[in-house]
Amino acid sequence: MPADARAQEIAYPAGSRRVGAHLALPASGRGRGVVVLHEAWGLDAFVRGACARLAREGFVALAPDLFGGKQAADVAEAQRLSDALAPARVEEDLAGAVQALQNHDAVEGPRVGVLGFCLGGHLALLAAARTPRVGAAIDFYGLFPHPPVEVAAVAAPLLAIFAERDAYITAEAVAGLRAALRAAGKHATVAVEPGVDHGFMNDTRPDRFDAAAAARGWERLLAFLRAELA
């Protein structure tokens, strides 16, 4: 962890449970809050690194461990862990994460952002639809059947960025999301990054990572968060 971002492992309340999470604080000690939602691999080095990068940009970043300490070793296990998520429990975990950030002394502003990748991107959509006080939602290549998301209920401004060569999410599904958001009159941008695969933001997976596309993704997400959480 770089010297300009302080990190710690914490736990926050969600219903009658406590959820483990990774928290990164900016050097200034204060900033806008962002919930960072992990991929189907679990709360791993990529997600902690994303929190550190956000902290270096002045945000307070909180990444909940939605798998209770488990990390997937392969695609099959990642699918099992994702499928095992109970929708009601996930919503409780997301709402608890938002509340934990808002209650933190370091967090400024009445609303927080939610940023996710893959499974976490889909859950960012869910948070925008079901969790109050989300002021901005960013979905990187997450659009799946489970847990179900009612697009018409998305209340927060949304930035969704997908991969042109995604083996998991079809171009038709992305077009359907764009059309549904437009029909519902939502403040949303749905973009497709050309020539890249699912997971192109993840610098710990060289088979998927695309440095140029990831740099553009970071520029867009930072500009979006700064504009919507100002």
Image (tube, helix red, strand yellow):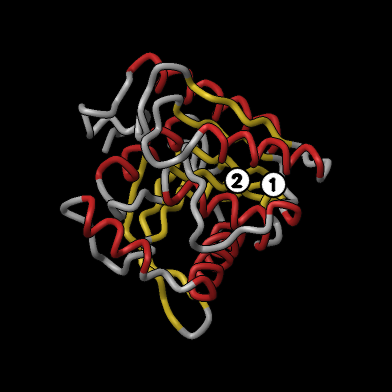
Seen from this angle, which residue lies furthest top? 212
Badge 2 density bin: few <14, some 14–19, many ≥20, Cα 10 Å: many
Cα distance, mark 1 to mark 2? 6 Å
| Residue 107 shown left or right of residue 133 in the figure | left
Circle on res. 113: 2
Residue at 59% x, 57% y: name it.
126
Residue with the mark numbered 1: 135
Task: Name the one closer to the observer, 171 or 160.
Answer: 171
| Spot occupied by residue 123 in the image (x, y as percentages of width and height) | 52, 54
The answer to which of marks 1 and 2 sits earlier in the sequence is: 2
Name which residue lies at 30% across and 58% down: 79
Q: Is residue 183 left or right of residue 167?
A: right
Farthest-out residue, bottom: 16
The amino acid type, in three-letter code, at marker 1 is Gly
Q: Does the residue at mark 1 contact the one at mark 2 (Cβ under 8 Å)?
A: yes
Q: At label 2, which amino acid type do we have?
A: Gly
Label number found at residue 25: none
Q: Where is residue 11 shown, x and y percent of the image?
A: 39, 68
**Above or below, comparing residue 98 to residue 174 in the picture:** below
Give the secondary structure at mark 2: strand
Question: Which residue corresponds to the image point at 49% horizontal and 75% vertical from the top-left?
Answer: 89
Quadrant of residue 12 in the image?
Answer: bottom left
Q: Quadrant of the N terminus?
A: top left
In the rendered image, the quadrant that contains the C terminus is top right
Q: Is residue 91 left or right of residue 194?
A: right
Q: Within 10 Å of the Cα at label 1, are there few (<14), some (14-19), or many (20+) other Cα atoms?
A: many
| Residue visible at 22% across and 33% down in the picture | 205
